[in-house]
Image (spheres, helix red, strand yellow):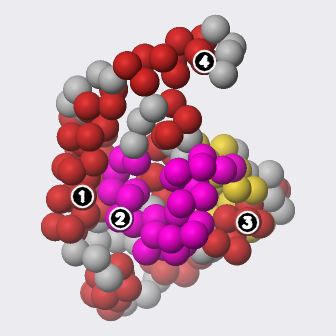
Amino acid sequence: MERPLLSVFFKAISECETPIIVAVNGPAVGIGLTMLLHCDMVYARKRAHFRAPFTHVGLVPEAASSLLLPLVVGNAWANDLLLAGRTLNADEALASGLISRVYEDDALVTESLKIAEQIAGLAPNSVKQSKRLIRGVSTEQIQAQMKREGVVFAQQLASAEFKESIAAFFEKRA
């Protein structure tokens, strides 16, 4: 099952030369979490939480998260998130390296905008080149991993275990 709009979106954010700053104001679950891996700075309010429940619904990681998450948080945290589907609170996400800072709920947007304005005032080519160097993974590697994941993701969408997990969810059973 092709998901062209998501593919276009993830290609765009993974190749974006301008820093992407995100303020997480609630749950970042599934694609909401994997999207963060393509962003440069992620700030969250104290009550935010983060989860990648792919295996809980019979699916596999997507959007190059099987490549990027271990690079960002290390294998132990990545396995906890991607295999076990563990939910991280904001403090755990900060400790893991998934996010950059945690703010009080009322300060999240204000503080995130301050940082964005600061970066916007810097030398643009210096920022662009620094972002490219910091990433450490080529956009070609990211695109290739997204393609590999997409094939397996589509297979899982058609699988009996995915259908069973969806049925169990709607029937409110394990």
Mark drawn on residue 123: none
**What amino acid is at disc 1?**
Gln
**What amino acid is at disc 4?**
Phe
Task: Name which of mark 4 and mark 2 comes first in the sequence.
Answer: 2
Mark drawn on residue 145: 1
Circles 1 and 3, Cβ within 8 Å, touching? The answer is no
Could you say whether the residue bearing mark 4 is in a helix, strand or loop?
Answer: helix
Q: Kindly identify the residue that appears in the image at 36 percent across and 47 percent down.
A: 62
Residue 55 in the image: above or below residue 132: above
Residue linked to disc 2: 67
Circles 2 and 3, Cβ within 8 Å, touching? The answer is no
Residue linked to disc 4: 169
Q: Which residues are magenta?
A: 61-87
Circles 1 and 2, Cβ within 8 Å, touching? The answer is yes
The x and y percentages for residue 107 are: 78, 62
Q: Nearer the viewer, mark 4 or mark 3?
A: 4
Q: Considering the image in quadrants, where does the N terminus appear?
A: top left
**What amino acid is at disc 2?**
Leu
How far apart marks 4 and 2 lie (CA) works out to: 28 Å
Residue linked to disc 3: 92
The x and y percentages for residue 21 are: 51, 65
Could you say whether the residue bearing mark 2 is in a helix, strand or loop?
Answer: helix
The x and y percentages for residue 136 are: 32, 82
How far apart marks 1 and 2 lie (CA) works out to: 7 Å
